[in-house]
Amino acid sequence: MRSPHDFRNGESPLSRDRTHFHSTVAAQKLRRFNSLILLLRLASFSFSLASAVFMLTNSRGSGSPHWYDFDAFRFVFVANAIVAVYSVFEMGTGVWEFSRETTLWPEAFQVWFDFGHDQVFSYLLLSAGSAAAALARTMRGGDTCTANKAFCLQSDVAIGLGFAAFLFLAFSSCFSGFRVACFLITGSRFHL
């Protein structure tokens, strides 16, 4: 017989004998949900990295304008680089959760971390893309795009890729919000 000191975290002798039942349907739904989030994070990473690379390589020589001469284009580069790094980290935690069936950090911290950062970085991408789109439109009305069409075209591509990264991160944020809502209602990140 065990003494009361052998049990941890308020366990009783009866609580150790309970087995948790998870149906195969619930496990499949959980895997599908995690796979979808991982796919959205992969897409967000791909588009934000491509946007950052397109903006970084947008220089045509000494007579052409450079991306770093414009604040909005620097904002697009930095925002997309930050989101690419964040997406790699989140893909790593997603793979960890997928393979080990547990979160990297305590569940309460993990759901709020994912949701908060998805929200912040989504708005960061949206504001960077909006600022750069306004600048690109202004440049298109002036002489810059007449003389340097390739510079303006590559800037437009980088801005478009940044908006695509925003969309995928926003969808990921919706799923993170679902996890937060489930956690607040049931105490678990899934309603299953």
Image: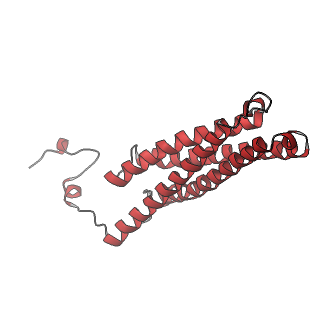
Relative to 88, residue 60 above or below: above
Q: Position of residue 76 (x, y in %)?
A: 69, 40
- Can residue 174 be spotted in the picture? yes
Residue 178: x and y in percent read: 53, 60
Q: Residue furthest left?
A: 1
> Where in the figure is residue 95, as x and y percent of width and height?
39, 50
Q: Picture coordinates of residue 187 (x, y %)?
A: 43, 56
Depicted 36 relative to depicted 166: above or below: below
Task: Out of 181 and 28, give the one closest to the viewer.
Answer: 28
Please tell me whether residue 165 is drawn above or below residue 71 in the rendered image.
below
Q: How does the figure colour the protein chain or chains?
A: secondary structure
Name which residue lies at 42% across and 50% down.
Answer: 94
Instruction: Give the residue drawn at x 78%, y 47%.
Output: 133
- Residue 104: quarter of image: top left
Say above or below: 145 vs 19: above
Residue at point 35%, 72% (across, down): 25
Q: Is residue 8 shown left or right of residue 104?
A: left
